[in-house]
Image (tube, rainbow, N blue to C red):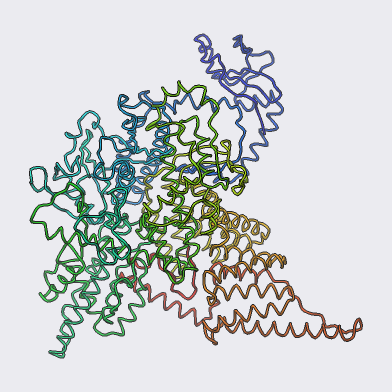
Amino acid sequence: MQCLKVLTMSGWNPPPGNRKMHGDLMYLYMVTVEERHISITASTRGFYLNQSTTYTFNPKPANHSFLSHSLVELLSQISPAFKKNFTALQKKRVQRHPFERIATPFQVYSWTAPQVDHAMDCVRAEDAYTSRLGYEEHIPGQTRDWNEELQTTRELPRKNLPERLLRERAIFKVHSDFAAAATRGAMAVIDGNVMAINPGEETRMQMFIWNNIFFSLGFDVRDHYLELGGDAAAHAAPTNDLNGVRAYGAVDVEGLYTLGTVVVDYRGYRVTAQSIIPGILEREQEQSVIYGSIDFGKTVVSHSKYLELLEKTSRPLKVQRHNVLNEKDEAVELCSSVECKGITGNDGRHYILDLLRTFPPDLNFLPVDGEELSPESQRQGFPRPHRHRLACLRQELIEAFVEHRYLLFMKMAALQLMQQKANKDAKANVPAITETAETPTENKAEKTQTPASESTSATEASTDSPSQTENNTSAASQAATEGEDKSSKPTANRPQNGECKSPLEGKELEEMIPGLAQAKELAQTLVAEDGSCIDPKSREVVLNACKAVGSISNTSFDIRFNPDIFSPGVRFPEDAADDIQKQKQLLKDAAAFLVSCQIPSLVKDCLDHSALPMDGATLTEALHQRGINVRYLGNVLEFVDKTPAKAQLEHFYRIGITEMITRCAKHFFKTYLQGVELSALSAAVSHFLNCFLSSFPDAVAHLPPDELVSRRKNRKRRNRVPGGGDNTAWASLTPSEMWKNIASEASSYYHFTIECESVDLVVEKYGLQKSTLLREISLKTGIQILLKEYNFDSRHKPALTEEDILNIFPVVKHVNPKASDAFHFFQSGQAKVQQGFLKEGCELINEALNLFNNVYGAMHVEICACLRLLARLNYIMGDHAEALSNQQKAVLMSERVLGIEHPNTVQEYMHLALYCFANGQLSTALKLLYRARYLMLVVSGEDHPEMALLDSNIGLVLHGVMEYDLSLRFLENALTINTKYHGARSLKVALSHHLVARVYESKAEFRSALQHEKEGYTIYKNQMGEAHEKTKESSEYLKYLTQQAVSLQRTMNEIYKNGSNASITPLKFTAPSMASVLEQLNIINGIIFIPLSQKDLENLKAEVQRRQQLQELGRLEEATEDRALELDDKIPID
């Protein structure tokens, strides 16, 4: 819908002096749709046509011109087509949802795009050059001082909620702006549009400053990382550093500053963008560093101010304060790794940088001479050689490990106390603990939370992984009850992070075992106190427990790690030998914990479907949430392979293999692209994808035609490309070489054997699909391809041509600042909902939504989660229209901030379809479900547990609109998938049988219906028993089907016997009612409404009151955070 052909600034700008004095501001040149060329003057009085043409300047008003205050009004007078089209355009624009037009805080790139004609647009062309964004911005007064902005926002006051909201909004805004500017700069650097600050040096060693941001390439310059693994270490260091910045930023200690950091992968290069410390460029590095080491520990300095600031972070980050030796063999005290440098800027702020070793090393991937790992690790073939020596444990793992040790600690203390008490009781038959049991007061009880939650900053630090809640009190009560049973289970079976039982179960057990409550309370006071007022025996209990779990303190539970252990070049004082030995043991235990507890717990979660990865990104997220690094992917897959229930994990295994193959291909792609000249980029990328995915055996690269002509010129320009090699080497790649590379990469990096000579063999062996592989590799490398049907299976021609590669995007990693207050409201809301207070929960979540909007603006992943939960609550409370409205917003937002085919978006579609159906919009519901199914096919293929849910939904809706045959196809497919992934005897399968039986009943095929319902009945009877209402319901339905079948048979016999004279009793064929379909839809989507009698309601109220009292006692403080629901009306929470 075109309104104008051309609108541009006229060549007569700017107005000459004499015209300025007539009020002329600027001149515009336009071509209307009717091909009329006009020149317009914008003056202080308004807009009017002048008499200028392309070659003659005549600023006088045109004869019949009139003055207009608005340009639109003037154009509407001149061009009828403009008037008509512009009105239509505005109408169309208003009809679109605002969420389709609002910008997202961080750019999201799509890996596919339709073919768009590149239309002439003078405004766009001018924008690209007048703002000089592609070039250096040396114009003073225009550049932003990023460092000042990032640090000033951190210094804003944060005493009350309004102040915190203002501060968080400012931090978020500056971060998202900085990420955008850094990304643009990094692209300009790699594209060769930025001058280096050391142009004389080799391209790999060059550094750049653009727009007040410092850029460096991810190569090992000056052999800095020589001992640590060269280029591989230089490539891994920026992401480790970013994780460190993220961790220190989350702890948020006043007075300690980190640099704005963004890591950009673009065209095979890794660029680190950082804000610049004031004054750092004027000084030598040796002068600036007043804390830490610039040569990996050979020379080390310390500073009291830094020690004081870092001490505050040491508890939440679990970093131990320790001494190292400097070059003069003097002990220097540090409270971080030696690489962490402290620099005081010219602005007087204390900065820390190079945080690549914030977290302790991962010994499974760090072979050290003379050190033996624990048997659990050795059994799995560790330690293994790795590309570099910077492999660290993740923060989530440290948190989980410490929580695991805390359970162990409480259990041991309780056990010993019970033994002591038993001994005392045996001597004198009086309970001797009574006087100490009375000491714990409420405030002491509060002190007994796990160490991480003692400082509020630490609770913020753990908001990165909401799934890991600190279930302190429940953990303690449970540890104590386990201690009572003297359970001899190995520690691996004890529940870990977030798997603890509900505090109520512990409470009931406590009441059954007299004396245990006292022992537990005493154990808690021991942890809370410094042990001064307690008798020596009890102190001994704590001391023993502390020793057993490796606590650094002898009087309370406190586990911290020394990040410098096993760092090459770092030496420790003699007197710390014992301590170092303990630390080494702790690191070995943590490495063993990852292998023996976290990996099995992930696989167990996948087996019971509480974790359900659908693609590479969600798989990586599931690994990271449990603290498992992706380098363990080979181990995870081996573990799945050996699991007895491997068939039920087939989807997980397939996603894991896809992820491994595409990551290996990405590693190869990185070096492959570095040797490609810019003019040959699209040819090189299409050739790479053909070798990777096309069945065409001899993929030949198309060299750009001008390559041969201007060969000599190119030779000179080549050094513009950082690290450039032979520019046509990429063209000789063949599919078989490519797959050999992938197999060797999988075995050297992941220690996993992939049997593959070609893409077709892999697809066949592992049941993968090429569209999924294409999506994964494109997302990982930033490739954008043309949206069309590709034939990868053709053996006669390659699947992609260079015209199919539309763009290559940067892949960006950065810190995501959190809205802490909003997040706490959201969690409290979830907790309320889980206790059954729907209204209060709804209010809290609405409040959270307001706060999220306040901090993040209108678009953000967390707002999306908020809207989804609100919609679910609205639906459960019966407000279907409101549910639909909120869910629609959630879908739009998910598409914008996560991507059109992200697994979360697919699930949002399913919820939206359910609410559409409830609102009577049947065809819309069906369209949404078909769309979700299509996306699901692209993302993970047919064979996935989530597909069963989708097909059940589709089948039910089709049943509702009486499309019985089609409905059967979907429901039977769902039945097959459910049987495969949940086991033939599961309740999900029983429900699937029932749904299929209902459709057969509607088709009057009673024999088939009976067969399916019998299957369902058998499962219910075996799982639930005869008396359960589900079994009774099924049995009733069986009777009804049998009657229908008998009466149908009678009628048929009658017809056979008497022919046309037969007196036929009409048969009842019931079309399903919408209400019954909706009820089944609710059940399969996990929403169950339970009708309650008056008595039930009273019981429920009593239960709720009891919980409130418990909460007041501080028992349910943190423990209800992310728990499965325990009330009778099971309300599902996403």
Q: Is residue 562 above or below residue 275?
A: below
Q: Choose top left, top right, bottom left or bottom right for residue 525.
A: bottom left
> Residue at horizontal 22%, vertical 33%?
346
Q: Can residue 714 be spotted in the picture?
A: yes
Q: Residue furthest right?
A: 1061
Q: Can residue 858 be spotted in the picture?
A: no
Q: Is residue 527 above or below residue 1099?
A: above
Query: Is residue 991 or residue 589 the one in the foreground?
Result: 589
Judged left or right of residue 4, residue 570 is left
Estimate the x, y position of residue 514 in percent, counting from the top left: 26, 85
Query: Is residue 1070 or residue 625 the one in the foreground?
Result: 625
Estimate the x, y position of residue 124 in percent, counting from the top left: 54, 28
Q: Choose top left, top right, bottom left or bottom right for residue 610.
A: bottom left
Estimate the x, y position of residue 874 in percent, counting from the top left: 54, 62
Judged left or right of residue 470, residue 47 is right
Estimate the x, y position of residue 816 in percent, counting from the top left: 38, 47
Query: Is residue 552 or residue 524 the one in the foreground?
Result: 552
Q: Choose top left, top right, bottom left or bottom right for residue 209.
A: top left
- Count of labels in the image: 0
Judged left or right of residue 293, residue 385 is right
Report the quarter where the N terminus lies: top right
Q: Is residue 980 above or below residue 437?
A: above
